[in-house]
Amino acid sequence: MSRVDRYLLKHFSELFSSLFFILFFITSVVFFIKVTALTAIIQMNFIELGTLYIYLLPKTLIYTLPITFFIALCITLFNLSRENETIVLFTLGYNPKKIAKLFLILASLLSSLLMIDIFVLVPISKQLNANFLDYKKAEAKFNIKASEFGQKFSNWLVYIENSDNNKIYKGITLYQDQSTKDNEKLILADQALIETGKGQLRLNLEHGKIFEFSKDEIGQVDFDKMYINTRPQTNIGHMQTIMEYWNGVFVDKKRAYDLAFFLLIALFPMASALIAISIGIVTYRYDKSGIYLYMFVTISTYLGLTTIVCSWYPQSAPLIVFCSTFALSYFIYQKRIKALF
């Protein structure tokens, strides 16, 4: 690596790190607001909110890193052009082709890291996030309140006289209607406690009686302790392997769209590197303004095209959008940079 390469990378890395923290903070705030909105549905403490935020980090990096790379490259080269440093570099024999090669290699490395994020970290984090939310929602359904009728625990109707903050209930009555397999049942208990763990909820009853009603007789059983288990109607705890998760793209449209969209976001640094060079390297005397408009148009156009094509043809969208964007960026690079410098 030459001294000029190190010089360019130094300026680029300084701006990249600053922009990354700004965009990462903004994106994190947006995702954190979505997370905290869940507290209107389920109760979560600060540690659980932090856990959900960590699960969203791989997805946050996918959105922030490619856009940060593009903006940092544009502004870095524009600042060098404003100080006439690019003209000096070209005069000394460091032509735009070397700049393009340097940052295309850097863009390829970044896209490769994002690919690992997409194929490995995103499936794990999304499943952990979904399982955690499903468990909390299922747990919320069993927050039995005192002196309220019509509450259910599994297939039992529940009524309690009073409770405390530790989920210890007093004066428990459970009723199960007659079914094709079981007789009508009634359970009376002095005390009960709800325990949670491994996606399962268990009602621990103490000091009570079980009454079973049949056509001919009424049976009674006294007990000191009894446990009633119930498992939520979700796949809590079930984790697909990475291969199983991404095999779903062939049958699940939503997963196919997600994969295509994430891949195109990850490929954005490679697809847009030449456009960034074309925007950043200017003759400052004649082209002082327009860089921010060009950046906005490039990013919004790419994201819009990605969204539309991924919705229509998710399997072929990465190839279509990436190839067309890279071809257009190369054409712009040839017209604006290679032909002039």
Image: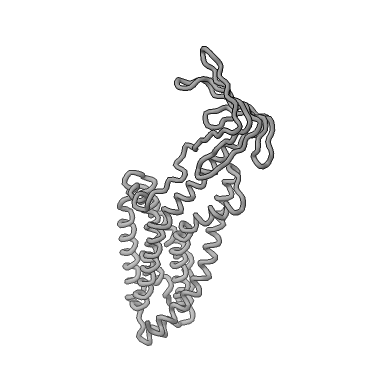
Residue 317, position in %: x, y? 33, 53
Q: In which quadrant of the rendered view does residue 294 lie?
A: bottom left
Residue 197, position in %: x, y? 53, 44
Is residue 113 shown left or right of residue 159? left
Q: Residue at x 57, y 57 (%)?
A: 29
Q: In the rendered image of this protein, does residue 91 appear above or below residue 295?
A: below
Q: Residue at x 44, y 71 (%)?
A: 73
Closer-to-camera residue (227/97): 227
Residue 23, position in %: x, y? 52, 63
Q: How is the image coloured?
A: one colour
Is residue 194 shown left or right of residue 299? right
Total numbered circles: 0
Is residue 341 visible from the viewing direction of this image?
A: no
Q: Residue furthest top?
A: 216
Q: In which quadrant of the rendered view does residue 87 lie?
A: bottom left
The N terminus sits in image quarter = bottom left
The C terminus sits in image quarter = bottom left
Closer-to-camera residue (255/333): 255
Q: In the rendered image of this protein, does residue 322 appear above or below residue 196?
A: below
Residue 311, position in %: x, y? 37, 48
Closer-to-camera residue (13/306): 13
